[in-house]
Image: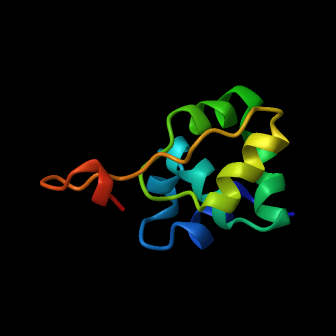
């Protein structure tokens, strides 16, 4: 059984696990998008359904893939909505990433 500390170290490799554990929204989004079964189990032990839904309602920029976004909406019984798009300053919405 993987600990949340191990998950943070594995999925947010560019940051110290202790720092990654402080940003719940980013950690949850990383697990939802890139986590395996053990990572997901650690997330479900540590965070409530409300916290998971909050990440879907206010996702960190640039983490979710369309597949993960849709899958987690369906898994949590929510109607999938469009994945938020990043808008780079100086670009109009039609050319956003």
Residue 19 image offset from top left, x and y in percent: 44, 54
Q: Is residue 81 visible?
A: yes
Residue at image position (70%, 26%) is 50
Instruction: Name the quadrant of the C terminus.
Output: bottom left
* 85 horizontally vs 37: left or right: left
Residue at 84% from the left image edge and 54% from the top image edge: 41
Is residue 5 visible in the rendered structure shown here? no
Q: Nearer the viewer, residue 7 or 76?
A: 76
User: Which of the image's four quarters has the N terminus?
Assistant: bottom right
Colour scheme: rainbow
**Among all residues in the image, which is located at the extreme left?**
90
User: As rendered, which of 55 and 87 lies closer to the eye?
Assistant: 87
Q: How many marks?
A: 0
Q: Quadrant of residue 45?
A: top right
28 is higher (above) or lower (below) than 80: below
Residue in the picture at 60% in, 30% down: 54
Residue 36 in the image, given as x and y percentages of width and height: 78, 68
The single residue placed furthest to the front in the displayed view is 94
Quick check: 96 left or right of 81?
left
Q: Residue at x 16, y 52 (%)?
A: 89
Report x, y in % for residue 75.
84, 43
* Residue 38 location, quadrant: bottom right
Residue 63 position within the rendered picture, expressed as x and y whole percent measured from the top left: 51, 58
Residue extending farthest to the top is 50
Nearest to the observer: residue 86 or residue 12: 86
Up the image or down, 55 lies above or below 1; here it is: above
């Amino acid at each position: 059984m993987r600990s949340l500390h191990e998950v943070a170290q594995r999925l947010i490799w560019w940051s110290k696990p202790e720092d990654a554990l402080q940003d719940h929204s980013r950690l949850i989004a990383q697990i939802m998008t890139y986590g395996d079964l053990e990572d997901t189990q650690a997330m479900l032990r540590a965070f409530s359904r409300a916290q998971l839904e909050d990440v879907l309602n206010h996702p960190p920029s640039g983490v979710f893939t369309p597949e993960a976004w849709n899958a987690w909406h369906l898994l949590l019984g929510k109607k999938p909505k469009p994945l938020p798009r990043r808008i780079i300053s100086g670009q109009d919405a039609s050319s956003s990433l």
